[in-house]
Structure formats: structure tokens, C-alpha cells
Image (spheres, rainbow, N blue to C red):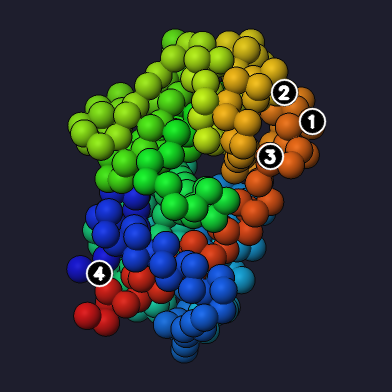
Amino acid sequence: MPRSFCQITDFSATEVKEVFDLCAKMKKKEISPKPLDGKSVACIFMKESLRTRVSFEVGISELGGNPVYITDKEIKLGQRESIADAAQVLSRYLGMIMIRTFAHSDVEELAQNASVPIVNGLTDLVHPCQILGDYFTIMEHKPNKEKYKIAYLGDGNNITNSWLNLASIIPIEFRIGTAEDCHPDADIIKKAKSNPDSTIIISDDPKEAVDGVDVVYTDVWASMGQKTQADLKAEKLKKFQVNSEIMSYADPNAIVLHCLPAERGREITDEVIDSKQSVVFDEAENRLHIQKAIMLFLMQQMNK
């Protein structure tokens, strides 16, 4: 069975570092590999996206491949035919499959039945490509640090789950500032806390969460498919807005990340997202580079 990237814990700490190394080399144009030459890659979108679609299609093309865009209407994954059957059929046509969907179990079932690598472009549970790209961005802006202090303010969602997954394999002090009933996945928290080299803190006090941190991170309070809960979430999470007052408690040289799209004026203010501390557009660019590195790594594993 080929290696797939369904979540960050599919890679070891050594493999994550190898992906970061490939990412840096490709971004600097030190290497220009074409592991997808002569191959097509499915880009399955059960959830629409700007960054994920463009970054994957460009990345696939730059790796020599041909992206094939497939929507929910066309595939009806798990409805028109079983996921297992679809995985086997698509494997006969393609060199790789990327999927952005709601249920994480769909990605896992694809990976269990496909004979080509599967890349998770996002699920409701995790967003692994995003977080590897985010960590790469942090390393670019704050190099040569063994353990970063990172504060996430907002809803416990797929972003926080993926940060916790990363903390379960590499040393991170990860602080989550959120409301009592907005915590991330309990099993993922437990696994992250089992890594003795990482520190996991959950607080209902945003000032305590960001105190002296290197990085302040936020995301929308209601994810795609949860917009009916937006007003309720906003009421619960309003004190966790990333604004100038909150930033004053972080390290003076702290950087700000947001996976975008942002609801300006809600989870983050214009003043902060447009400030010199904000690296959100470097972060967005690095989605392209890290995804290329992940795809390259998976193809290298196929050839071993």
C-alpha cells in the first residue's frame, strides 16, 4: 500500500523535517523535481476553496503533473458508488489523489483502498497541509529555535487539532485560548499531551494564553458548514479576538498567523492583520511550497 498523508501523524518527526527540507529547497529553486511527469492528479472538492484549489493545481503543474478538478456533483463520493470502488477506479487513471471534504473517514477509506497516494486537503477533523505550511512559515521568520511558544485563540477546530497532532511528534509549547465548550478533539489533546517534549495548555483567559508567546494564531470562529452557528460562536468567543490589546501581552517580536479567509473585525482586527507582525500572506504562499514538498515526498516513497 502506498504512503498517504491523511494527517500529520502519518509522518514521523524525521519525515516532517525531511518535508521541510524539500520545501525550502524547492522554494529557493535549488531543486526543480518533476515526480508527477506524465501523471494526472485528481483534485476532489466536496468543499469549495480558493487557496487549496489554486495552490494544489499550480503545485501539481510545477511538479510536472496534470491536475484534474472534480466536484461533489460529479463524484457523489459514497453515494453513486462506494468510496472503495471509486478509490480503485481512480487509481487506474491517476498518479495521486487530493481530496478536500467534510468527513475525515472518507479520506481514510480512500487511502485504505487506493493504490496511489492520498493527500488530505482538509477535513472537518484536521487540516494537515495548512499546519505544516504554517510551521514552515514560523521557522522562516523565527529561525534556529528549538521549541516555539504558539498561542491559538478561537474555536477548537481542524486547525487546532492539526497543531496538536504536530505537537505530538515535535516539541511545541501550544496554548489554546478558547471558551469552555469550544475545545478541540479530546483524543487528539490526550495524544499531544503524551509527548513529554511538548507543552499543551488550554485556558479561558486570552491574555494568559498569549503571555510572552512567539506566535499568535487565529481562524474563523465558524468553519465552512457551520455558518448557522456563527452568531452563537461569536458571542462565546468575542473576548478571544486578536487585537492590539491582546498582542501587547505577547512577545514584542511575536508574529501573527491566520490560515485565511479572515472575517476581519470578528476574530482579528484590520489593525493586527495588516500590521508588520502579520505574516498571513507569506503563510498563504507557503501552502504552495509545502504541498509540493508533501507530494514529492510521497512520490519518492512510492519509488523505494
Instruction: Determine the CA span between mark 1 and mark 4.
Output: 46 Å
Q: Are marks 1 and 2 in contact (CB under 8 Å)?
A: yes
User: Residue beneath label 4, please?
Assistant: 2
Q: Quadrant of the N terminus?
A: bottom left
Which mark, by number, is residue 178?
none
Please provide percent x and percent y for residue 42.
48, 69
What amino acid type is highlighted by mark number 3? Answer: Gln
The kind of secondary structure element at disc 3 is loop
Query: Marks 1/2: CA distance?
Result: 7 Å
Label 2: state its secondary structure. Answer: helix
Q: Nearer the viewer, mark 3 or mark 4?
A: 3
**Cβ–Cβ below 8 Å for labels 1 and 4?**
no
Cα separation between marks 4 and 2: 47 Å
Q: Amino acid at mark 4?
A: Pro
Residue behind mark 1: 271
Q: Is residue 235 above or below residue 146?
A: above
Judging depth in this view, the residue of 216 and 268 nearest the camera is: 216
The answer to which of marks 1 and 2 sits earlier in the sequence is: 2
How dense is the environment of label 4, judged by Cα within 10 Å: few (below 14), some, or many (20 and up)?
A: some
Tell me the CA gap for discs 3 and 2. 11 Å
Kindly report which numbered mark, 4 or 2, lies closer to the viewer in this rendering: 2
